[in-house]
Image: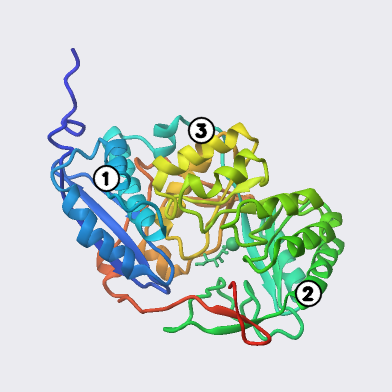
Amino acid sequence: MAKAGVQGSTRDREITGARVIVTCPGRNFVTLKIETKGGVTGLGDATLNGRELAVAAYLTEHVIPNLIGRDAGRIEDIWQFLYRGAYWRRGPVTMSAIAAVDVALWDILGKMAGMPLYQLLGGRSRDGALVYCHANGDSIEQASEAVGRYIEQGYLAVRAQSGVPGLAKTYGVTKSKLAYEPAESELPTETVWSTPKYLRHTPKLFERARADHGEEVLLLHDVHHRLTPIEAARLAKDLEPYRLFWFEDSTPAENQDAFKLIRQHSTTPLAVGEVFNSIWDCKGLIENQLIDYIRTTIVHGGGITHVRRIADFAALYGVRTGFHGATDLSPVTMGAALHFDTWVPNFGIQEYMHHTQETLDVFPHDYAFREGRLHVGDTPGHGVGIDETLAAKFPYAPKQLPIARLEDGAMWDW
Ligand code: GCO
Ligand code: MG
């Protein structure tokens, strides 16, 4: 009989410690590091933009004391313990904390097995994960030029957002050369929103982008929860001639039935779910085939263990994954998500905003962009580490997301 390897033995898998590391290399990140008796450690991302310390406290005060002494190899049981056993279920704070534990445990398992995470999940389904990046500009011309620059860099899919005449600030549009970073001040910035102005303007952006760049490039757009269902239906219909890859978060999705209205009126593919954190948030959307892409990703959806359940359920209905990948999701989430993308049979696309160089230095990683796709390496686990000495040089800086008001001053969805 083969003897259990020292690395994988139950004794070595005992969790002996766990720590939360908060760092701000250009923006805030919350990372959980779990240590085992055998010396193998794992990392999980717990970042919830603008609410970072709530998750850090949930982990430190309520989760970590429950982990010590447990077997790191019991990933499913620890997930169930943290979810079912907490009595108070779901919600972004809880599910981000559970995700951090889950991802750190999968990382440990991969390191102990000497295998990259995609291999543990079932092996490669593809060579690389198709990604989309963010092009934006104050005007339609500038936004279309930005699309062109990304195509030149080898991107096959580009999200386009442009400023709207008459509105001082629009979601997704930045004046700086860096990636759009909405959480910019200690208290929320107030922005003004006008649905009629936006609805008149947006079809022109895509008319121009198609005229400038042709039919080949995959184009995406994010409405960021601003429309009522019938307005969303109207815009999805107006955008049909430009053959979008997807139309994202057109209406807030607390009411899953709202998507029936959009669906009845348009064949533009629909994506939703970056703010979801459980299969229960998207169950109706998926089984009623009201969406085409589910965006709930690992950090806000309870980790690999839970998002895998969402993806498998989605596969039954022809719904594909399109994971959230904004800069507020750390490279740890990006690494884990890319392994998942490399395996998951019903993969659609992966969002890829670019982290700052400081962030990339704090989180050494082995994924790389080539010809429109991100490729994971073969480092055991998810392949993303943390340079704690460097991380300590970037102390936490409180920042919140903006809010939106209508022109008459009433609160709206940002
Ligand atoms: C996206 C998202 C982000 C969010 C951000 C909030 O599609 O990438 O909508 O831009 O606004 O993740 O924290
Ligand atoms: Mg979005």
Amino acid type, mark 2: Ile
State whether label 2 is within 8 Å of ligand 1: no
Kind of element beneath mark 1: loop
Q: Position of residue 265 (x, y in %)?
A: 81, 52
Amino acid type, mark 1: Gly
- Relative depth, front residue between 142 and 67: 67
Q: Residue at x 23, y 51 (%)?
A: 34
Q: Is residue 172 above or below residue 7?
A: below
Amino acid type, mark 3: Arg
Q: Is residue 10 above or below residue 239?
A: above
Q: Is residue 178 above or below residue 92?
A: below
Mark 3 crowdedness (10 Å alpha carbons): few <14, some 14-19, many ≥20 = some
Q: From the viewer's perspective, is 272 left or right of 166? A: left
- Relative depth, front residue between 266 and 127: 266
Q: Position of residue 289 (x, y in %)?
A: 67, 41
Q: According to the image, label 2 marks what residue?
A: 140
Q: Is residue 320 visible?
A: no
Kind of element beneath mark 2: helix
Write down the quadrant of residue 255 in the picture. Answer: bottom right
Q: According to the image, label 1 marks what residue?
A: 85
Q: According to the image, label 3 marks what residue?
A: 124
Write down the quadrant of residue 148 in the picture. Answer: bottom right
Q: From the viewer's perspective, is 171 left or right of 101? A: right
Q: Quick one: quadrant of the C terminus? A: bottom right
Earlier residue among tags 3 and 2: 3
Q: Is residue 303 visible?
A: yes
- Relative depth, front residue between 267 and 159: 267
Mark 2 crowdedness (10 Å alpha carbons): few <14, some 14-19, many ≥20 = many
Earlier residue among tags 1 and 3: 1
Q: Position of residue 379 (x, y in %)?
A: 37, 42
What colour scheme was applied to this rendering of the protein?
Answer: rainbow
